[in-house]
Amino acid sequence: MSGFLVDRTMVVTRAKEQSESLCDFLRSEGANVVELPVIEIQDPADGGAALENAVQKIENYEWVVVTSSNAADRLAKALNGIIPSVSFAVVGPQTAQPLINAGCSIELAPSKAVGDSLLSEFPSPAQERNEILFVRAEKVRPLLADGLRNLGWVVEEVVAYRNVQPVIDQNKVTQALISDAVIFASASAVNRYTQLVQAPTPAVALCIGPVTAQAARENGYKNIYQAEEYSLEGLMSVTQEWAAK
């Protein structure tokens, strides 16, 4: 078999429902893939009631802010064909795509696909309508919501989903310990995986974005490669960069 990952073993930590395309790509390049999801996506504690209520009054908001593809997926489903005349702000192409597919218009996507960049490029409220709907995971850093409030916005935060730890296959953990590299798409995945294997192993961490890379540093990974584009393509690109070296 040809491919730049022949004889390499790669650990994929993404949630099962999000990892298929990445695993297919890695296998197409000759890799042995250890699928070890350390995150499972579940409904929020209220079953999605708060999101449904927010959608019913979505025209009251000036902006809708979404910072993850999971939140975007759930918001698009909750819209159920409604195309609101509000401005949408996202952190990158993966987050934008479900909303674009639902017919929504993306008004703001920062030059770098991270929440910090979104905040730095976000406008101040210019009129009486100063309410923002922030659709997010159950646990997020407070930086974005607090920063928007500091700009003068009234921010309503709605939890669209939860990240929980799935049942772990111990055989996969054993395989992960002797792998060549591990792929991370979030800081929470770095933390959970490292706790699971009880060491920064393998030492090579391929990460989406600076927040995930920083979590890898804090957990002791020695060789960290950071994808600049917060997307599947970004992970593919950083995998090729690592393999070339």
Image (cartoon, grey):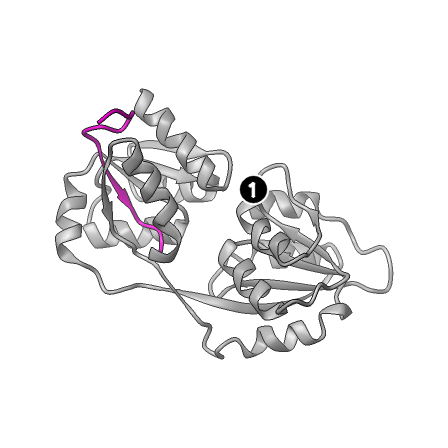
Residue at label 1? 113
Amino acid on which disc 1 is placed:
Ala
Quadrant of res 52: bottom right
Quadrant of res 164: bottom left
Q: Residue at x 65, y 73 (%)?
A: 54
Q: Residue at x 33, y 42 (%)?
A: 24
Q: Is residue 158 above or below residue 102?
A: below
**Magenta-drawn stretch, dominant element (helix, strand or loop):** loop
Residue 169 location in percent, x, y?
Answer: 17, 58
Residue 23 location in percent, x, y?
Answer: 32, 43
Residue toward you, 153 or 226: 226
Q: Is residue 221 visible?
A: no
* Number of numbered discs on residues: 1
Is 236 displayed left or right of 76 in the figure? left
Quarter of the image with the N terminus is top left
Q: Secondary structure at mark 1?
A: loop
**Magenta span covers which residues?**
1-15
Mark 1 neighbour class, 10 Å CA radius: few under 14, some 14 to 19, many 20 or more: many
Is 16 displayed left or right of 57 in the figure? left
